[in-house]
Image (tube, rainbow, N blue to C red):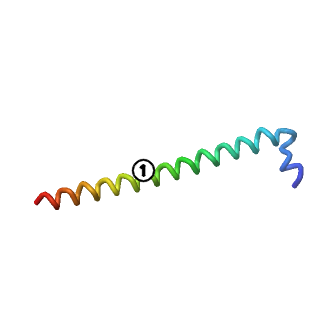
Amino acid sequence: MTEFLHMGGYATYVWSAYGITLVVLVANVVAAIRLLRNQRARLRQDYDDLENEE
């Protein structure tokens, strides 16, 4: 198991690449969720504005 974790001497490169990839993936998911929430709130506000005009 230790040999696997050391990755044949390339552990620093391999694990940092995994870490960076994980951070980017999580950031993309968080950004997408925030964008979705903002768009929903904006659409809700636009809809409410249209209802109030009538």
Q: Which quadrant would residue 15 be assigned to in this image?
A: top right
Q: Quadrant of the C terminus?
A: bottom left
Instruction: Depth check: give the residue in front, 3 or 31.
Output: 31
Q: Is residue 15 above or below residue 33?
A: above
Q: Who's the residue at 84% across and 50% down the image?
A: 4
Residue ranking furthest to the left: 54
Q: Amino acid at mark 1?
A: Leu
Residue 2 located left or right of residue 42: right
Nearer-the-camera pick, 14 or 50: 50
Quarter the N terminus occupies: bottom right
Q: Quadrant of residue 14?
A: top right
Task: Report the side of 54 relative to 2 (left or right).
Answer: left
The residue beneath circle 1 is: 35
**What residue lies at 20% left-to-right and 57% top-to-bottom?**
49
On screen, 28 above or below 49? above
Disc 1 element: helix
Taking the spot 17% from the left edge, 57% from the top edge, the residue there is 50
How many marks the image carries: the answer is: 1
- Expressed as whole percent of the image width and height from the top left, the position of residue 32 reads 46, 50
On the image, the x and y values in percent for residue 8 come to 86, 41
Q: Position of residue 23 (x, y in %)?
A: 63, 47
| Side (left or right) of 30 relative to 4 | left
Decide if residue 32 is on the left or right side of residue 12.
left
Tell me if mark 1 has few (under 14), some (14-19) or many (20+) residues whose alpha carbon lies within 10 angstroms of its own: few
Q: Is residue 53 above or below residue 16?
A: below
Residue drawn at x 40%, y 56% as measured from the top left: 37
